[in-house]
Image (cartoon, rainbow, N blue to C red):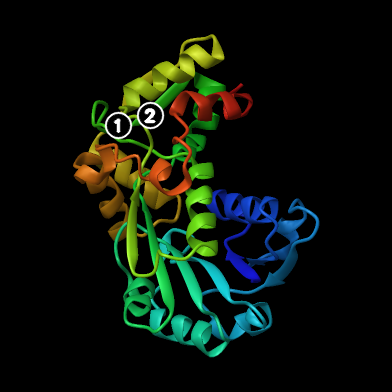
Amino acid sequence: MTILVTGATGTVGNQVLRQLLDAGHPVRALTRDPAKAKNLPDGVEVFAGNLADPESLEAALTGVSGVFLYTSDGSEVLTNGPELVGRLAKSGVKRVVALWSGFDGSVITALRGSDLEWTVLQPQEFMANALTWVDSIKTEGVVREPFAEVLSAAIHEADIGAVAVVTLTQDGHHGRDYELNGPQALSFLDKTRILTDALGREVRYEELTRQQAHDRLTAMGVSSEMADHVVDWHADPPAAAYTVNHMVEKLTGQPGRDYTQWVAENVDAFR
């Protein structure tokens, strides 16, 4: 079965693509900018297309039976769910694994009401979010975030990829929502200490106010509404965000990767 991976150059999509390849599955990559796909592995067909424009997906979807589907377009949740899901069905797609964007938007709502075989992956927070600290750690030795001691069991992007491969290629996952998190509930203070140990030099933590956190997101081009959603989530995350459920291990047979491992794999980015 040929599988199309949307967001193939992104943090999660790239993991899904590479792990599907490693498992021997035919894979296509969808990206808005094929120039950014130069570092994709050999053997991947690359197609240009934009999820916000379902008609642009016709060539990429021809002969595809499974799709790993982003439900957002950059920082904003897609609003064209019926059109997008209709295009997938019309093209002969049978199975869709959707990456949740923090709440059910139009795409997931449309999937739930469709005849497609769907699964929704609900990761709460990505370990890779720490890459937004690269510049401040390199230049100032500081992490700036709000809500210092609020706990979150962030998940390694490779574990999301592993779950996606299982749900895309194995039966028994239709109509399921999988809440995914990592094996530890950590605060920003905990994460800062792990980075300090890995770098061998002090990384300080400076707490932002709620408004500072909101303004930082809007300065990055995030809408005010979405910024409010993100900040509110960090202020009072749902229980699924900090209650370790070991779903990764239940689905893949392998324990989830912890934060220390993620930092060790990415520490050079912070030097």
Residue linked to disc 2: 144
247 with respect to 53 (left or right) = left
The kind of residue tagged 2 is Arg
Q: CA distance from mark 2 to mark 1?
A: 6 Å
Is residue 62 placed above or below 16 in the rendered structure? below
Q: Nearer the viewer, residue 173 or 137?
A: 173
Tell me what residue is drawn at x 55 percent, y 63 percent.
169
* Residues at circles 2 and 1 in contact by the CB criterion of under 8 Å: yes
From where the camera sits, is residue 224 visible? Answer: yes
Q: Work out whether residue 237 can be spotted.
A: no
> Which quadrant of the structure image shows residue 258?
top left
Q: Amino acid at mark 1?
A: Leu
- Residue 104 percent location from the top left of the image: 30, 66
Tell me which residue sits at (52%, 9%) in the image.
201
Give the labeled residue for mark 1.
208
Look at 29% across and 31% down and name the residue there: 208
| Front residue of 63 and 223 | 63
- Counting from the top left corner in percent of width and height, residue 135 is at 54, 31
Q: Whole-percent x and y of residue 217?
A: 38, 48
